[in-house]
Amino acid sequence: MSKLYNCPVEVTLDAIGGKWKTVILRYLSKQTLRYSQLQRRMPNITQRMLTLQLKELEADGLIRRTVYDEAVKRVEYSLTDSGKTVEPILELMCEWGKRRAREFALKVASGESWSGGVPRDPERACEQ
């Protein structure tokens, strides 16, 4: 028997809720990325959690995992057509986060120095 939802927001949160899924989707909305590239952008997520979140997003049909049969195995992640339909939601979340960061003078780490936690202008934080 399928789950009974009381509100469409529950359906949305069931697919993209949690601390990491929307962040992963946001990065993949900008470009196709390898596992290590996602890891660098998200220094506070454990390997186990990143792997779990990627598997769940793939199982829900929101991302695609492509394995390239080369001398050195290469795996890339990208949004599916279904995943691309989430982009407007992610954009609104990013804009809301920028306003909140400005309002409360919150620091947003981004860029190639993610793991260093270097503060960055929140206006550009969602661009990469």
Image: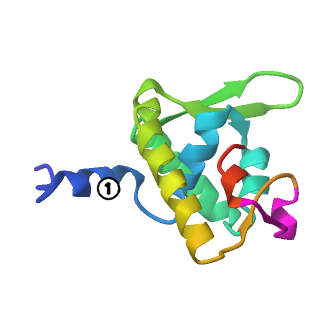
Q: Quadrant of residue 9?
A: bottom left
Task: Residue at 64%, 63% (x, y): give it.
Answer: 48
Instruction: Say above or below: 44 vs 59.
Output: below
When asked about the image quadrant of residue 51, the answer is bottom right
Determine which residue is flagged by label 1: 14
Q: What colouring method underlies this structural image?
A: rainbow
Q: Amino acid at mark 1?
A: Asp
Q: Residue furthest toward the top?
A: 69
Which quadrant of the figure contains the C terminus?
top right
Left/right placement of residue 59 relative to residue 41 reads left
Q: Circle 1: is it few (<14), some (14-19), or many (20+) Cα within 10 Å? A: few
Task: Identify the residue at image location x=54%, y=62%.
Answer: 99
Q: Which residues are magenta?
A: 113-121
Location of residue 78 in the rendering, given as x and y in whole percent from the top left corner: 60, 32
Magenta stretch containing residue 103, yes or no?
A: no
The picture places residue 22, in percent across and down from the top left corner, at 50, 53
Q: Please provide percent x and percent y for residue 85.
A: 40, 32
State the residue lying farthest toward the front: 103
Percent across and percent down for residue 52 are 55, 56
Q: Secondary structure at mark 1?
A: helix
Towards the viewer: 18 or 55? 18
Indicate left or right for 8 with 66 as reference.
left
Is residue 107 shown above or below 74? below
Q: Nearer the viewer, residue 69 or 123?
A: 123
Q: Residue at x 62, y 68 (%)?
A: 102
Q: Is residue 116 magenta?
A: yes
